[in-house]
Image (cartoon, rainbow, N blue to C red):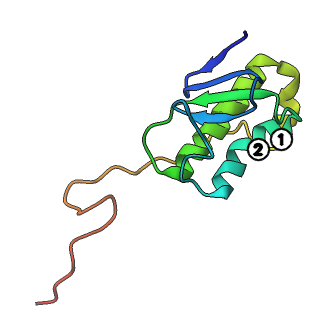
Amino acid sequence: MLELLIAAGIAAFPAAECEVAFERRAAESQETRPVLRMLIQQPLVAANRSGQYDVVCTVSGGGLSGQAGAVRHGLARALIEYDAALKPALSAARLVTRDAREVERKKVGLHKARRRKQYSKR
């Protein structure tokens, strides 16, 4: 059985049951929104490989939406590593581009990254 591993913690296997699992639990059993489940399936749909792989992923940090985006990006990269001919289709669907936004650091003398102390006139 061929296994694909990506640094994002994604493993894709040729389908036996056609399921997506988070840390060995089915995605449908997770209390996630249907939009997030659809987001995770986007690379498989864009590559016309829906139902052909079992996906097992381990995700940590961030919120539900950020984790779904990370799984989507990792799955797209895993599919490209498995079959390089899928790269044009996945690139056209803009699934290979990483979201580069990060949390801005807290500055000295401020409450948060940009939140200043309240101005007092007197």
Residue furthest to the top in view is 1
Residue 113 rendering spot, x and y as whole percentages: 33, 58
Report the number of discs: 2
**Residue that appears at 72% across and 9% down:** 1
Q: Is residue 16 above or below residue 38?
A: above
Tag of residue 45? 1
Quarter assignment of residue 108: bottom left
Neighbours of disc 1 within 10 Å: few (<14), some (14-19), many (20+)? few
**Residue that appears at 51% across and 31% down:** 23
Which residue position holds label 2? 42
**Residue that appears at 61% across and 58% down:** 33
Q: Quadrant of the C terminus?
A: bottom left
Residue 55 rendering spot, x and y as whole percentages: 67, 29
Viewer can see residue 42: yes
Between 108 and 92, which is closer to the camera in this rendering?
A: 92
Q: Quick check: 111 left or right of 90?
A: left
Viewer can see residue 91: no
**Three-letter residue code for mark 1:** Val
